Image: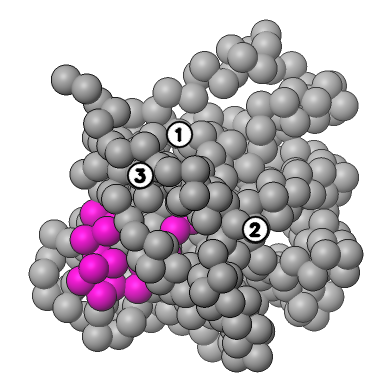
Amino acid sequence: MNMSATAPLSDAMRSFIEGLPKTELHLHIEGTLEPELLFALAQRNNIELPYDTVESLRAAYAFTDLQSFLDLYYAGANVLRTEQDFYDMTAAYIAQARADQVRHAEIFFDPQTHTERGIPMATVFAGIARALRQARDEHGFSSVMIMSFLRHMSEAEAFITLEQALPLREQYADLWSAIGLDSSERGNPPEKFQRVFARCRELGFRVVAHAGEEGPAAYVSDALDLLQVERIDHGVRSEEDPALIERLIKLRMPLTVCPLSNLKLCVVDDMRQHNLARLLRAGVAVTVNSDDPAYFGGYMNANYLAVASALALSREELVQLARNGIAASFISTAEKERLSIELEQYARSH
Ligand code: HPA
Ligand code: ZN
């Protein structure tokens, strides 16, 4: 069997995708740590790695499911120690995103991965925020920070994390406006975090949650009903419940889909079987995102190119994916309008 039977993209289509102005709404900053930087930070911080070379580390990125990835992702994050480390990682991501014509990014970070190792909460915020503010000031690159709770930990621990972060809220009010939920999905349903999410909403945070990546469609419904999220991260398994799909369409509920992630974590066996195009054509507000690009083999353009090729998306469909991203973002109406004008102008003139 020829496993690469997808039509190759024309040069014109490729350059159309590469130049398309984009927003990225599902990106874990710890998942942007490339092996080269990971080695450099290990050396800077005198940390011994269980891998001899960048190549041998990269070769270990052969995942069978979400957990097999998370084990390496958390191990990799151990090299992040100082404010400068978080800055360097974030600055490297921004450079990649800008090269892919990303105009705005909403960035997950997992403070518990770091505070558990004795890294102060303030260090994590400071390094990430310094890079984001610099990108905004120098290049007009806008962003939102989404502080995420690790769902394999307890709700009590999520409350403690919230308590530790709240004193920083004012200092980072220009960036930190949302809360997320990530890590091992199966066995850690939305209901486990119902109270802490209620508290976050009461405090005025926007809330999102990973659901329906490996977990069942019921976790998506529960994220809507019990956590009252404004977006679902992944959500691809929603299709197993047709009534839920109807609901997502009616609500215009965004799904932040991550195609290369789904392929690498064996959520789909083959990109041609990905349901992104089906969901889009049914009227679900799907968006394209890179999740953990250093681990899954590509940033935003690679994700767009992969689905365009495997699912034979039209130019209009690609523009609709980009439109959905703008609509689903947590920016002001004026900023959405500005990005929409740029996108529509691009679509008309290319
Ligand atoms: N799913 C759950 N947790 C995560 C992911 C993901 O795709 N990436 C980083 N943490
Ligand atoms: Zn994710």
- Image mark count: 3
Q: Which residues are magenta?
A: 275-292
Question: Please, what secondary structure does the residue beneath circle 2 have?
Answer: loop
Magenta stretch contains residue 284: yes
Mark 3 and mark 1 lie on one chain; the one further toward the N terminus is 1
Q: Which residue is mark 1?
A: 69
Quadrant of the image occupied by residue 230? bottom left
Q: Nearer the viewer, residue 261 or 110?
A: 261
Whether residue 148 is visible, yes or no, is no
Secondary structure category for the residue under label 1: helix
x then y, percent, for residue 347: 51, 70
Q: Which mark is residue 309?
A: 3
**Disc 1 within 8 angstroms of ligand 1 (CB):** yes
The residue that disc 2 covers is 101
Question: Which numbered tag is attached to residue 183?
Answer: none
Q: In front of the other: label 3 or label 1?
A: 3
Where residue 23 sits in the image (x, y, percent)?
Answer: 57, 66
